[in-house]
Amino acid sequence: MNRHHPHFGHTLASRYMNHHRAPLSFHGPIIHVKAIIKLVEEDDRDPKGGTHQHFLVHQIQVIDIEGAEKSLVTDEAFCAIRYGDTLGLKEPIPGLAEGEEIELKGEYIDKNHALKGIGNPGDPVIHFTHHPVGFVNYQGKHYE
């Protein structure tokens, strides 16, 4: 039996997963991808806490996915990497640049469930790219 998100009322993953216990989870599947940075946007400071690096990726290559089928993943996604507090990375990832390859592991929110907001007109979202769920590899450095 699938559990439902306490605030959003839906379950995105095909089964309940351990990271769904985290209050920041949208109950999505975990995705591990390589992609190309398409557009780097300004950082966003959320008044509820945390600052996020925002960027779009495209040419997504799925390395692995847990809790969903690969067919859920589109060729483009919005990424939000939290930093500057105990819930995300310690510091922003330096030098994010358009055209560069990036490897991400995090929670995937499909287009039908992604929240539209600052920098995201409604693309799928890859978030939770930090402990305890995911990581980022960029220019030979590993961040979690």
Image (cartoon, helix red, strand yellow):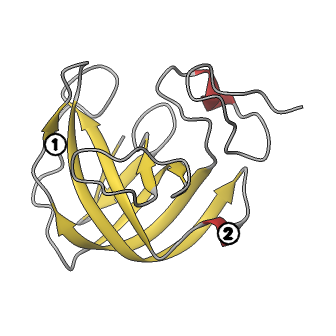
Give the residue drawn at x 56%, y 54%: 112
Q: Nearer the viewer, residue 69 or 118?
A: 118
Q: Nearer the viewer, residue 135 or 8?
A: 8
Secondary structure found at label 2: helix
Q: Residues within 10 Å of mark 1 (few under 14, many from 20)?
A: some
Is 81 on the left or on the right of 10, as rendered? left
Q: Nearer the viewer, mark 2 or mark 1?
A: 2
Residue placed under numbered mark 1 in the picture = 92
The image shows residue 121 at horizontal and vertical percentages of 31, 57
Identify the image quadrant of the N terminus: top right
User: The C terminus is located in which quarter?
Assistant: top left
Q: Height in image: 50 above or below 53?
A: above
Q: Is residue 60 above or below residue 136?
A: below
Q: Residue at x 40, y 61 (%)?
A: 123
Would you place residue 93 above or below residue 100 in this image? above
Sequence-first tag of 2 and 1: 2
- Is 110 situated above or below 100? above
Please, what secondary structure does the residue beneath circle 1 have?
A: loop
Q: Amino acid at mark 2?
A: Lys
Q: Amino acid at mark 1?
A: Pro
Q: Residue at x 52, y 72 (%)?
A: 74
Mark number, residue 70 = 2
